[in-house]
Image: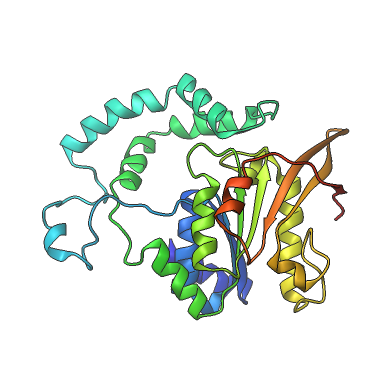
Amino acid sequence: MAGSSSSFIEEVIGEPVYIAGNSLGGFVALYFAACNPHLVKGVTLLNATPFWGFLPNPIRSPRLAKIFPWAGTFPLPASVRKLVEIVWQKISDPRSIAQILEQVYADHSTNVDKVFSRIVETAEHPAAAASFASIMFAPQGQLSFKEALVRCQMNNIPVCLMYGKEDPWVQPIWGFQVKKQVPEALFYEISPAGHCPHDEVPEVVNYLLRGWIKNLESQGLVALPLLDTQESLQINIARDLEFVRDGSKKSVKVHFFGSKFSLWDRISSYISSRFGKLELKS
């Protein structure tokens, strides 16, 4: 993946890019940025999974890795394939997929028909079960999530965090851990939003993401979303962001955590409070 992505950036785009990733894709995006700092201008993590891989990395732990002869490569061993097929029958069932989506999306009024159809279609592909097994049994990377963050810091790669507050899997507390390690990282908490805020409230994520990039490209001349001055980077701010979807007004609360945040800030992020409303403008 890293090789094809770097080749695409170098040969097709021809200049460094901003990358974003959700869930496991967030880990992948951060890992790519850490390994290819010359190709990345900034990375956005959307409820990023802070770890992955249950099997030892063959380079970091060669002796331990020998205990596990199979590490997610194709073709699948017969014994693994049989086990995976049993598990896959359960989790690929449309009813199971519907239940998972109900957990993932905080706003149950969100239309997920297209997402549901695409997932079901993908799950029915002949290679779907094997691909699932390959991901689940992939060994740990050479860099941990924290090590990838350190590399990004060393190479001055800006990091922006956007977390759906109601995510049942990767809760914002993981974002606070990143913020603690990288205090200069921007941290926006969105509510109501679950594991995939970019799909649940794309209007809000696009507004925040575009604003962050404009701020970086202008070297700070353009203010960050929700903020009026650079001094505001140190404080915590909460706003109701309004947007229009299908002719109707909707709103979410966005909490910006500045560089000066404490344990109480983490606790208070779970306490609803009302502030002034802010209407989204492109």
The location of residue 38, given as percent across then percent down, is: 53, 80
Q: Residue at the spot x=63%, y=46% of the render?
A: 268
From the viewer's side, name the closer residue of 120 and 68: 68
Residue 35 lies, with reference to residue 191, above or below; the image says below
The location of residue 282, given as percent across then percent down, is: 85, 56
From the viewer's side, name the closer residue of 249 and 82: 249
In this rendering, position of residue 250 left or right of residue 169: right
In this rendering, position of residue 206 left or right of residue 245: left
Whether residue 245 is visible: yes
Looking at the picture, the colour scheme in use is rainbow
Quarter of the rendering containing residue 41? bottom right
Q: Residue at the spot x=83%, y=33% of the render?
A: 246
How many marks on residues?
Answer: 0
In this rendering, position of residue 52 left or right of residue 269: left
Residue 276 lies, with reference to residue 37, above or below; the image says above
User: Which quadrant would the N terminus be assigned to in this image?
Assistant: bottom left
